[in-house]
Every structure is written in C-alpha cells, then in structure tokens.
Image (cartoon, rainbow, N blue to C red):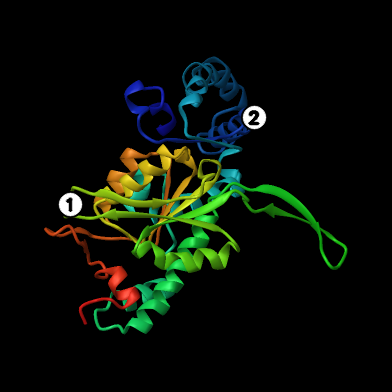
C-alpha cells in the first residue's frame, strides 16, 4: 500500500498523498467487501477488524500522517478536494522545469496570442513599427502580471446599485527602476498601469560575460520604503541583474520587495539571480533555450534596445 510506504523513513523524501476516509467508512467498506465478495459472516469480520486491522492502523498508519503532503478527508468521496488537487497538478505539469526548481520564478501562461507576438518580435524581418507595437503589448502583460504579486489590503466599496462589493486596495508604496537603456522601453507600460509612479534608473556597462561596472544610478530617495519593479526586457547571463539588485539592497530595499520584470529569460540568468537572491520574484513571458558562445540569448530577439529605439546599424 502506498500509505504504508510513508512509515519507512527512506521513503519520506518522496511526495505522497493520503486519501483518508473516516474510521466508520473504512469499516463499512470492509464489511461489505468481506460479506459479499468473500462470503464471511459479520461477526468474524468485526472480530478481525478489532483485533488486527484497527490496531495496525493506529500503530503504523495514523502516526505517519504527519509526513504526508496532503490529507484528504473522506477520501475518494471528497470530489471537490480531488478536483482542486488535479487542477493544481495540471498547472504544475504545465510549468517550465525552472519554475519547479525556483518557486520565485513566474512565467505568464502561454497562449496563441502570446506565442504569436513572440513570433513577430523575434522575426529579424519585422519592421521597427511592428516590433515596438507587439513588444509593448507583451511588456504590458508582464507588468500587469508583476503587479499581481504586490501585497494588497481588503477594501469594501458601495456600487452604483447601492450594493457592497468586497475587493482589494492596491499597494501604494511602489516605484519602478529601469536598467538603461532597454529597460526604459518598459516604462510606458508601467506608467499606464500605475498613474504617477516614480521611476528610477540604473546604467550598467556591459563587457562580455564579466566585468559589469555600475556607471550611473538615480533612484527615489525613499526607495527603501517602497516595493520595487526592476525593469529589463532581457535576462541573459544575470550578471547585470545581480549588480542592479545588489545596488537596490544596498539602498535599503528588502530583497522580498523586489520584483524583476522581463520579456525573456535565459536559464543561466535565472539560476544566477535566483541563487543569489532567493527571495526576489522574477516575472517573464518565456524561458529561452540558453546562451551562445558570445553570451547572447538564443533564440532571442537580437539587441532589444537597438530594435526598439531604432538605433541598429540598419
């Protein structure tokens, strides 16, 4: 029995679910099975249950419930609980493998619309006008998703019909910080979602895989009291992101108050950032294949800032 395996210490590192029925339900099932299928009389069944089955359950099964990940009251008859667990498992199976490793990594759910927009902005033949249009749409989705991870308070309002609606109030202490120059492409979407939001800037000089050097920073003076949305559309090696996040933390921003928003993320960058800062949140729209020998994200979308602002060689 799966449930008995939890009694073995070596097996407790695995994931187990216990579908626990009430004692009277278990007894009723045993009586029905033994009398109908095995032709036994009720007295014999009850005697065996009281002498062997129930004591074995109390000695071996009941104490191991504390090791279970999930306990479902009423077992297989609890259809609501089972449906919720099935939905949760389906969601987890649909996640990128990195999301299973890092619970602070969030990839927005892919749809044909999102895939279509990615197809357009990744196409080298896409015009600047179309690139900006569809990049802005994707950025807005990422920003909205990121805002959903901010803390909130419950709030009640009166609707025009005179009814009471219980909703939530937005986080008030918030600011954005863009990594110049590509991160500035995400500022309009953030301003469209958060009217009057303060936005700081960080400029980091990039030279190959290493040697990042902070060049310039201009941040709100009270940034330590705010939740921060860090804006950079591409997470590549993660070195620049680590330096930007380190600066925010030095300015007094709690690590858990930082949400890093980007369009695409290379697995190498995700590993670097999440291992350095396990309490920040990363929100992205797609996980890439990786980095090439030049540390460029692949399949990627080229130099994002050049394509967005129209400063490429063409």
User: Closer to the N terminus: mark 2 or mark 1?
Assistant: 2
Give the side of residue 242 with respect to residue 33, left or right: left
Report the residue marked by disc 2.
Answer: 24
Quarter in which the C terminus is drawn: bottom left
Q: Nearer the viewer, residue 81 or 201?
A: 201
Residue 192: where, in percent of width, then height?
Answer: 55, 68
**Figure check: 118 above or below 3:** below
Quarter in which the N terminus is drawn: top left
**Figure check: 135 above or below 298:** below
Q: Nearer the viewer, residue 271 or 6?
A: 271
Q: Residue furthest right?
A: 162
The residue lying at 44 percent from left, 67 percent from top is 139
Q: Is residue 263 visible?
A: no
Give the side of residue 68 with respect to residue 302, left or right: right
The residue lying at 34 percent from left, 63 percent from top is 181
Report the residue marked by disc 1.
Answer: 209
**Figure check: 12 above or below 306:** above
The image quarter containing residue 294 is: bottom left
The residue lying at 54 percent from left, 47 percent from top is 82
Residue 171: where, in percent of width, then height?
Answer: 62, 50
Element type at mark 1: loop
Other residues around mark 2 within 10 Å, as few (<14) / some (14–19) / many (≥20): few
Q: Are marks 2 and 1 in contact (CB under 8 Å)?
A: no
């Amino acid at each position: 029995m799966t449930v008995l395996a939890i009694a073995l210490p070596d097996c407790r590192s695995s994931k187990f679910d216990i579908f626990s029925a009430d004692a009277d339900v278990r007894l009723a099932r045993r009586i029905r099975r033994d009398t109908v299928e095995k032709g036994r009389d009720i007295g014999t069944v009850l005697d065996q249950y009281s002498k062997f089955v129930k004591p074995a359950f109390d000695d071996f099964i009941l104490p191991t419930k504390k090791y279970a990940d999930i306990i479902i009251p009423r077992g297989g008859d609890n259809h609501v609980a089972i449906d919720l667990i099935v939905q949760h498992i389906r969601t987890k199976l649909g996640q990128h493998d990195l999301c299973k490793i890092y619970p602070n990594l969030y990839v927005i759910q892919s749809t044909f619309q999102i895939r279509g927009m990615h197809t357009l902005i990744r196409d080298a033949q896409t015009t600047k006008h179309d690139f900006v249009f569809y990049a802005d749409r994707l950025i807005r989705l990422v920003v909205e998703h990121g805002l959903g991870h901010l803390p909130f308070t419950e709030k009640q309002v009166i609707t025009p019909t005179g009814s009471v609606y219980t909703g939530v109030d937005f986080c008030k202490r918030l600011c954005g910080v863009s990594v110049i120059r590509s991160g500035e492409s995400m500022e309009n979407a953030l301003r469209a979602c958060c009217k009057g939001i303060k936005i700081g800037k960080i400029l980091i000089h990039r030279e190959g895989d290493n040697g990042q050097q902070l060049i310039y920073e201009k941040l709100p003076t009270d940034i330590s009291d705010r939740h921060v949305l860090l804006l950079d559309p591409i997470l590549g090696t993660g070195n620049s992101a680590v330096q930007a996040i380190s600066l925010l933390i030095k300015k007094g921003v709690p690590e858990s108050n930082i949400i890093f928003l980007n369009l695409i993320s290379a697995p190498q960058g995700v590993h670097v950032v999440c291992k350095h800062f396990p309490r920040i949140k990363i929100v992205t729209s797609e996980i890439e294949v990786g980095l090439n020998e030049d540390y460029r994200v692949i399949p990627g979308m080229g130099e994002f800032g050049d394509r967005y602002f129209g400063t490429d060689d063409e």
